[in-house]
Image (cartoon, rainbow, N blue to C red):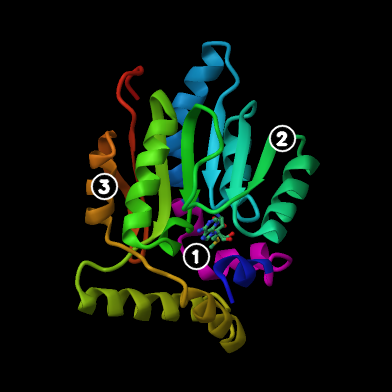
Amino acid sequence: MSVADAFDAVAGSYDQARRRLVPCFDAFYGTAVEVAAPPLRAALTAGRTPEVLDLGAGTGLLSLLLAAAVPGVRLTLVDGAPGMLAVAAAHLDARGVPHRTVHADLAGPLPAGRYDAVVSALAVHHLDDSGKRALYRRAADALVPGGVFVNAEQVAGPTSALDRRYDEVWTARITELGSDAEEIAAARERMRHDRPATVAEQCRWLAEAGLVDVDCFFKEWRFAVFGGQRPGGPAR
Ligand SMILES: C[S@@+](CC[C@H](N)C(=O)[O-])C[C@H]1O[C@@H](n2cnc3c(N)ncnc32)[C@H](O)[C@@H]1O
């Protein structure tokens, strides 16, 4: 089963399980929104519609949070799973948020446009490391000067011992939060497609892609939020 098929198979129930499977849900997505918001607000102040590109947008969780935090944004959601995008489009339509969905592979060209923020959550770790680096270069190139890239991501531990510890803590927390054996087994099945990299490696790739002020803004075990800014715009 491909990654897209694995997610399309759970598109209808995906949202309900998220708060269990991402134990730090609010801080994790909330930090991504905080990192992305300043250039969006700056665009609004300048009289422009802020443009956001969401990579591996799935059912639109991050896009919806951004649209709620910064009303007036226009969203482009890219994903390889059409069923996930259909759920996202229904959510965004219901809230009257301007958007377009693009069914495409993150390994290919990004939808044409210049974006005030390129965002992603829990998607880039499905690419191999050369795919991640190439995607970070394309994302940086797609930003307007001063635009922000942020990735709320599942990362590898810097050592195999820490990686095992990340997994133990995650399993204990999601069990406490009510994930049953079936939900954990289904998540682990999808995780067979995962190829996470460390925060340090990925921050280095973002800097190599030309971004500045690269930082990890949040980290709780395997969940991290990192990103940077394209030079040339107003300071954050
Ligand atoms: C765990 S979900 C995350 C969805 C959403 N960003 C969120 O935070 O809930 C991962 C998403 O990435 C998409 N994805 C994974 N690899 C992809 C690829 N190579 N090209 C396009 N989409 C991909 C999957 O289809 C899925 O919708």
The Cα–Cα distance between marks 3 and 2, rounded to whole angstroms, is 32 Å
How many C-alpha atoms fall within 10 Å of the one at disc 2: few (<14), some, or many (≥20)? some
* Disc 3 residue type (three-letter): Trp
Residue that badge 2 annotates: 97
Residue toward you, 31 or 94 = 94
**In this rendering, would 209 be left or right of 176?**
left
What amino acid does circle 1 point to? Val
Q: Nearer the viewer, mark 2 or mark 1?
A: 2
Q: Is residue 150 above or below residue 42?
A: below
Give the left or right position of residue 84, taking residue 158 as reference: right
Residue pictured at 71% horizontal, 32% vertical:
98
- Depth check: 128 or 52 in front? 128
- Residue 50 spot, x, y in % from top left: 56, 24
> Which numbered marker is on residue 22?
1
Please check the rendered image and state whether residue 10 is part of the magenta-colored stretch, yes or no: yes
**Pointer 3: what residue?**
205
Q: Is mark 2 within 8 Å of ligand 1?
A: no
Residue 100: x percent and y percent? 68, 38
Residue 198 sits in quarter? bottom left
Badge 3 density bin: few <14, some 14–19, many ≥20, Cα 10 Å: many
As drawn, 140 above or below 183: above
The local secondary structure at tag 2 comes to loop
- Could you tell me how far apart the alpha carbons at marks 2 and 1 are, in whole angstroms? 25 Å
Q: Quadrant of ligand 1?
A: bottom right
**Residue 82's x, y, as percent?**
69, 57
Judged by its main secondary structure, the magenta piece is helix
Check residue 207 for magenta coloring.
Answer: no
